Amino acid sequence: MQQRRSIKDHRSEGALFRRRALVGFALILLGLCALVSRYVYLQVARHDEFVTRSVNNRVKPRVLPPPRGLIYDRNGVLLADNVPAFRLEVVPEQVKDMKAMLAQLGMVVPLSQDDIDSFLKQVKQSRRFDSVPLKLHLTEDEIDRFAVNRWRFPGVDVVPYLTRNYPLGSLFAHVVGYVGRIDADDMKKLDEASYKGTTHVGRIGIERSYESVLHGTPGYELDEVNANGRVQRVLETHPPSPGKNLYLSIDARIQKAAEKAFDGRPGAAVAIDPRNGQVLAMVSVPTFDPNLFVDGISAADYHALLYGPDKPLFNRAISGVYPPGSTVKPLLALGGLELGLRTPEDTVLSTGVFYIPGQKRGYRDDRRGGFGTVNMKLAIMWSVNTYFYKLALDMGIDRFSKWMGRFGFGKPTGIDLDNEAAGVLPSRAWKSKHFRQPWYPGETVIAGIGQGYWAVTPLQLAHAIATLAGHGVPYAPRLVMSEQSGENNPPVPLVNPPTGPSLVTSEANWNTVEQGMQMVVNDPRGTGYGLGKGFPYTVAGKSGTAERYSRTTDAYNTNKSTAYLASRHRAWFEMFAPAEHPRIAVAVVLESGAWGAADAGPIARKILDAWLSTQKDPPPDTPLPESRTKAPPPSTAPAPAPTGATP
C-alpha cells in the first residue's frame, strides 16, 4: 500500500525560523554589547593605567645616585674625592640560572668570593627588577673582555659610577674615615628612597658622623629602551642634589708633621685652637690606607689590620685611654687657687716621701731626698709629687672630681666623631658603682698626680689643656669648620660657641699656673728645658710619665735601661703657645716612652714648629723676659733634677 506523503506547513516553518533568528540575533547583539562594554571599560575607564603600562614597556626609570660631598682641609687641600669608575651590575629578574651565570661570568671577569657573597646577600634583600652591583672598580681589560661576551649574559651590564678616593691615604684615615659597600644590614637602617642607587655609606670618621650631610638626594632619568632593554634615548632627566662639601679645621701640613714626628711609634697627638675649639691636627699611629675599604677589603687584608700587634684600626686619639700622669698637675694647681686652698706663695716641704697623717705608708716623690721647700710655680716646674699629694688631700675627692670634671674628664668631649671614649675621672661615685667599695684617702693622694683610677684620651687632655690655655673658657672640640652647598657657593662657617663660662675667676691665678708651665720648658731646672729654644713665641708646657710598675718596684733604680722603662711607661707632653695669648694647644702620648719630656716632648715641639710655618709674619726670635721664665730657688732647694727625670 503506498504511504501518503505529508504536506509541508510552510507557515509553521517560517514562524519557527523567525523565532530562531530572533534568538540568534539577540544573542549576537548581547555578545556585541558585552564586547563593546568591555572595550569601553578598557579604553576609557582604565585608559590611564594601560597607557602607563604601555609606556613602561618601552620607558624605564633609572635612579641617578647623588655625588658624595667632598672633604677638604682648612686650606682647601682635597682629602676625600670622587673619581669615575665602572662596575658590573645584574638585574636578577633577567637571569634564569644565577649560579650558572656567575660561574660563566667568572671565567670572563674574575670574581672573588667576597664579591659573590656580597652580591648574593644584596639580591636576597632587593626586588628582582632592581639592578644589584656585582663587582666594583673594573679595570679596562675587564671592561673589554666583558664587552666582547656581553651577548652571553642578559641582565648583566657595565655601569659608570663615582667611587671614593682618599688622595692622602693613611694621613687622615682615622679622622676622615672611609666609606664601604652598603649591605643588607645597612639597608635596614637607611632610608631606602634616599639611598636608591647608592652603593656606599660612611663607616668611620667624618664619613660616618656627617653621612646625612655628605650623601645628598638621588635624582632619576627616564630612558627609552628597546625589546632587549638597551637604552635608545633619554626622555627626561631630574638631576640629583649632591652632598655638601666639608672643610675641616685640620691643617694638612701640621697633620703630616705630627705623624712624621712619631716615626712609627704607637701613640697619638691632638692640637686644638683654644680660642674656638677647632682641631688643628689629630694623629693616631700606626694608621692604615682607607682606600682598601672602598671597594671591599679582602679577608686577608682585613684580618691583618684587625689583629695586627699595633692595632692600626684603633683610633688612639679618641678611643685610647691612658693614665695622664703629671699632666693634670697644672689643672689641679689652678683648682687650688680658684677654690681658695692655696696662694701662689704657699710652700710645701718635699722630703722625698709624703705621709698621710696617721698612716705609715709613704708616697714617693721623684727625687730621692725630695726637692726641699717649693711654692706652686716650682712645684709645676719640677713636677713635685709631694706638693700635689697634699693639695689633692686638702681638696678632698669630692671637690677634686667636681673641679677636674669641669675640664671635661670622665665624659666624651662632644667632638663631631663617633666612638669617643668617656675615660675615667676618679670619684667616690665611680668607685662605688664599679667596685662597691668606699673611697680611701690614699686613692685621693695618687689621683693628685694622675695615677690610680685615672683614664683619659689624648683628645680629652688636649681639650683640657686648650681650656686652660684659653683662660678657662671651654669649647667643644670641632673638626668640621664649614659646609659648602655647591661649588659656586662660599663655605658657610659653623658656629661653635663656648660650652660654659670661664673656669678662671682671677687672671692672677691663671698667670701663676701659666708662668709655672713656662718654667717647665724655659728654666734650666725645668723637666722640659730646651723644648722652647729657638721658638719665636713663648712656650708653656708640662711633662707626664704614667708609670706602670707595682708599688714594690724601686722607682729610684737608675740602673734600669731606658728601653726597660719605655716598655713600662706612658710618656705624655702638653704644650701651648704663645704662652700669654695661646693660639694652639697640643697633647701628645707615646704608648712606650721612658720619660714624658724626653720622648713625647720633641713630638709636641715639632707640631708647634709645623704650626709656626703656617702662620703669617711670625715674630722675630727674641730673648724671653727673665721674670717670665725663671724664679729664684729657695735656699733649701737641692741641686737641679736631671732633665726628664720627673713625670
Image: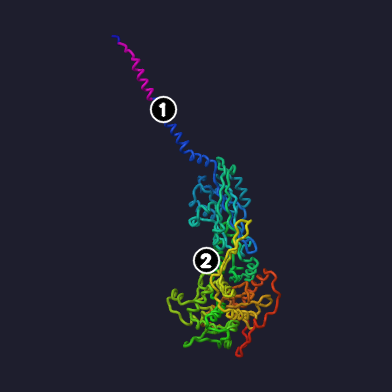
Q: Position of residue 502 (x, y in %)?
A: 55, 74
Q: Residue at x 67, y 78 (%)?
A: 533
Q: Position of residue 335 (x, y in %)?
A: 54, 79
Please tell me which residue lies in front, 497 or 385. Answer: 497
Q: Position of residue 148 (x, y in %)?
A: 61, 45
**Residue 29, which numbered label?**
1
**Secondary element at image label 2:** loop
For disc 2, the neighbor class at 10 Å (few under 14, some 14 to 19, many from 20) is: few
Q: Which residues are magenta?
A: 4-23
Marks 2, 1: nearer the viewer: 1
Q: Quadrant of the C terminus?
A: bottom right
**Residue 419, which numbered label?**
2
Tally of marks = 2
Identify the coloring.
rainbow
- Whether residue 568 is situated above or below residue 24 in the rendered picture: below
Compare marks 2 and 1 and give the one earlier in the sequence: 1
Q: Position of residue 554 (x, y in %)?
A: 54, 83
Q: Is 646 covered by the magenta stretch? A: no
For disc 1, the neighbor class at 10 Å (few under 14, some 14 to 19, many from 20) is: few
Q: Is 22 covered by the magenta stretch? A: yes
Quarter-wise, where is residue 311 in the image?
bottom right
Q: Mark 2 and mark 1: span between their CA atoms?
A: 79 Å
Q: For the residue marked with disc 1, what is the amino acid?
A: Leu
Q: Quadrant of the N terminus?
A: top left
Q: Residue at x 46, y 75 (%)?
A: 430
- Whether residue 25 is situated above or below residue 307 in the rendered picture: above
Left or right, residue 618 beside residue 353: right
Q: For the residue marked with disc 2, what is the amino acid?
A: Asn
Q: Is most of the magenta stretch helix, strand or loop?
A: helix
**Residue 98, which numbered label?**
none
